[in-house]
Image: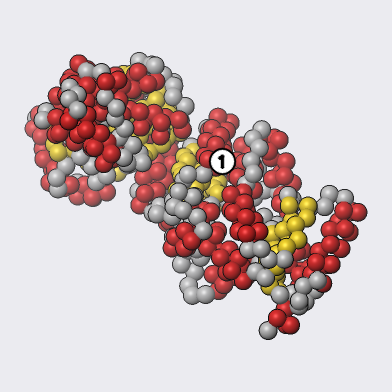
Amino acid sequence: MKIFIYPTNSLILSDLVARFGHEPLAIMQEISKKIKTGGLDSPPLNITPEDPKFGLKYAAVEVPSGVRGRMSLFDPLLTQAGAAIIVRDPVISFGCMGCARTNELVNFLIRAKKIPMLELDYPVSEEDAREFVFRISEFLKSLKPAEEKE
Amino acid sequence: MNSTENLVRIAQLSCGAEYSGIQKEIDSAAKQVNAVIVYPEVDIKEIENIEEEFGLKVASADLKLMMSRAKSIVTGKVHVDAVFVATCFRCAEAAIVRSEVRRYIHEKTGIPVISYSFTERTTAGTLLTRMEALTTTARRKSLLARETQSGLTAGIDSGSTTTKAVVMKDNKIIGKGWVPTIKVLESADEAYNAALKEAGVKREDIQALGTTGYGRFLIGEHFKADLIQEEITVNSKGAVYLADKQKGPATVLDIGGMDNKAISVMDGIPGMFTMGGICAGASGRFLEMTAKRLGVEITELGALALKGSHKKVVMNSYCIVFGIQSLVNSLSAGSKPEDVAAAACHSVAEQLFEQQLQEIDVKEPVIMCGGTSLIEGLPRAVEELLKVKVIVPENAQLIGAVGAALLASGFIRG
């Protein structure tokens, strides 16, 4: 199953999802597509002024262009998500997209999809961390693996 | 701009620029002024601790990164010549951080810093004058420190509405020209010839020429100018020179035909500045249209405004279209022309106050210059809003040309 993760660039979450036979929907793959497709017209991310306009699908023009540009990257992830794991209040090193408004909007949209979802707090102790990994693994085990979906 | 000039390292502290698709535009504007954009490196621990150290709590991690980068500049961990602070237009959290980061760097280091709020429509052209002013301030400190004009020099200010020219000799203006800008080169020729004629000198006698304003590159190349410089630094110089306030702090306000400039100056050198105006409703263009609608010359509008009261007319020129609409409505409702003129001046001053003066430190003396400063109602409206005395120096409309002639004298050889 395609699992949306938040923070969307969390390597740890991405790895956990993959270990349990699912496909993580991480922002890295969208950025990678941008950078590897065609010429690098607008470095560093190859996002052009057209991308924030695409973001109008999610947010009106009075919403800052940086939010809309980020939303254009999130669009395929939001569209494909069959389930989601959201980690609340993570530290920056766990994963981060930089903009709090974008994060709020992405979290809202993924919740609004009414798909299987696990929301949990970022662990602050070793014991919490074990529980954190355990809960994620149980959630992932409860979902149909990616290959069985086809 | 001269590609042989020293490379200037500009630190970019921003949030959202790469996601708005405008990083290329920022890089391009920097390249055109022979500058390179750098990103101060910071440790992740510093980002985690920055809110407490900086004293500002924010939700967005990129804004924490901005504050951390500012700290690494202030503490000297990274060496840069200038700083460009930019965040998304319409982001309230970012606007607070942008303003505080700029103030923090300016106060702690004296490194020239500018800030900008962008949309996906921001282009290199929009950023160019700002980048040019930033690099000029970083690069030409000794030239900008010049306080007197020497020899026989001239300056031409090719503005969006009018073209001004002056000829100066031994620290005195000896010739002036002021014409509407129609065709950039022809108008510059006309203004320059008028100044030369009044001065009683020939073009070949001029020892050095400086150009500024929107048409500076075109006319600079045409006249083979010694100095081609943007209007932020040139106008600052011209303003403090004409007002005789060269030492210490000053605030220079220039409401132009197309945009406004608010510059916080120290010893004649710009520190913080803003340039813009969301709409022409905040510029001299709106006053020009008001004068036309009232059936008076633009030169008469100011005196008319002084006879009226802005309180009797509701006017908001946040947008020039709505501004004209409220102007027409108020006249239809029987408002007196003098009250409408006063309201138009107040509205323009209000836009300047709300959109730009909030972003710089307004320190006295406040010097208003440019052609609009001669519309008496406007400096009065600014005085009322700021509650400070506003100085309009003699020849205030010529500041750009005077600043250019003054700075050009630094190029006289021998």
Please state which of residues B123 and A101 is positioned toward the viewer in this rendering: A101
Please state which of residues B381 and B228 is positioned toward the viewer in this rendering: B381
Q: Residue furthest right?
A: A127
Residue A41 position in % (x across, y down): 46, 67
Q: Residue at x 47, y 40 (%)?
A: B114
Q: In the image, is B404 to the left or to the right of A54? A: left
Q: Label 1: which residue?
A: B93
Residue A13 position in % (x across, y down): 75, 64
Which amino acid type is marked by label 1? Answer: Glu
Q: Quadrant of the C terminus of chain B?
A: top left
Q: In the image, is B2 to the left or to the right of B221? A: right
Regarding residue B245, the answer to whether it shows in the image is: no
Count of number-bearing discs: 1
The image quadrant of residue B50 is top right
Residue B223 position in % (x across, y down): 19, 46
Q: In the image, is B117 to the left or to the right of A150? A: left
Q: Residue at x 84, y 58 (%)?
A: A132
For label 1, the SS is helix
